[in-house]
Amino acid sequence: MRLEGKVAIVTGAAGGIGYATAKRFLEEGAVVAICDIDAERVRVAEKELSALGKVRGFAVDILNDEQIENMVKAVVAEFGTIDILINNAGITMDAQMYKMNEDQFDQVLDINVKGTYRVSKAVLPIMMEKHYGKIVNASSISGLTGNFGQTNYAASKAAIMGLTRSMGRELGKWGINVNAVAPGFIRTRMTDQIPPDVMKQKIDKIPVKRPGQPEEIANVYLFLASDEASFVNGAIIVADGGMH
Ligand SMILES: NC(=O)c1ccc[n+]([C@@H]2O[C@H](COP(=O)([O-])OP(=O)(O)OC[C@H]3O[C@@H](n4cnc5c(N)ncnc54)[C@H](O)[C@@H]3O)[C@@H](O)[C@H]2O)c1
């Protein structure tokens, strides 16, 4: 029960890594608000996870301040506070740069970077007031190494690293730890569209010779969201099977 009594918001939690994280946090005793833009999948996820503990689903676009504010208010009204924010929601819109239009570039930067900024900003007053909080952001090894077809995504995930380090510097004195996870190749809807031959090439480059599972990233989020990581701040934890 590493998160006993803690109240967590997990964004992008209708599937993939976010869903696995919500599940793991519930197993560890947290109350969990799952937030995702996909209302139908949020409803299904809430129903599935409700057997494990207190969970509420919110259909929220992390680019919509009003929806974010309503979710934050509802979580505080129902559960009393917010201790943990997992800024997990993110998208890819891959294309080689010479074919990528500005809209593809902007959308990925907006959701991955500004979405993280917006939800973080909405929970900060609550965490600052009580001098306690854990914020964990989703970066990627693409942000460290770059990746073919991902100029937009890699730029967004590198931005998350800078955002995380800066937030850690600003918020440490308020008792708030801010860290990021940089996953490698993880089996989710995001990577399911990759053609089998490209998938094989990618797996060949991973020293452990397999893709990661969402639960293996959920475990890293869990560590960073727990008090076991009390002296970890502004860190980027790579979880990529040794790939980068
Ligand atoms: N899968 C990987 O290999 C991998 C690798 C590195 C980093 N990541 C990062 O991990 C995070 C989770 O990815 P995943 O693989 O589970 O992908 P996923 O596509 O399964 O999950 C992402 C979720 O975010 C939601 N979302 C998208 N836009 C949103 C918005 N505007 N508001 C609210 N929710 C929104 C989607 O509906 C989806 O449920 C992402 O930030 C991703 O960039 C994934």
Image (cartoon, helix red, strand yellow):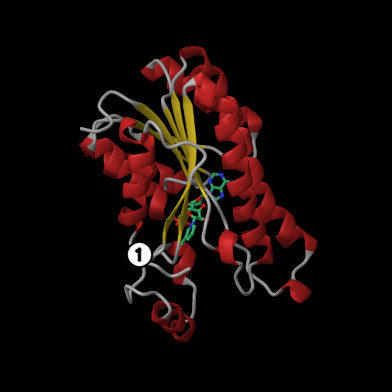
Left or right of 123 in this view: 187: left
Instruction: Quadrant for residue 163, please give it.
Output: top right
Question: Which residue was labeled with disc 1?
Answer: 212
- Point out residue 179 in the picture as x, y percentages from the top left corner: 48, 40
- Farthest-out residue, top: 129
**Residue drawn at 22 percent across, 38 percent down:** 27
**Residue drawn at 39 percent across, 18 percent down:** 78
In the image, residue 134 above or below residue 149: above
Q: In the rendered structure, which amino acid carries the disc numbered 1?
A: Gly
Left or right of 114 in this view: 83: left
- Point out residue 236 in the picture as x, y percentages from the top left corner: 49, 48
Give the position of the N terminus as an image quadrant: top left
Instruction: Quadrant for residue 151, please give it.
Output: bottom right
Cβ(mark 1) to ligand 1 < 8 Å?
yes
Q: Which of the two residues, 186 or 177, is positioned nearer the viewer here? A: 177
Circle 1 — which element? loop
- Point out residue 196 in the picture as x, y percentages from the top left corner: 43, 83
Res 73 seen here? no
In the image, residue 199 above or below residue 171: below
**Residue drawn at 29 percent across, 43 percent down:** 23
- Point out residue 55 in the picture as x, y percentages from the top left corner: 33, 32
Q: Which of the two residues, 184 or 120, is positioned nearer the viewer here? A: 184
- Farthest-out residue, front: 231
In the image, residue 109 above or below residue 201: above
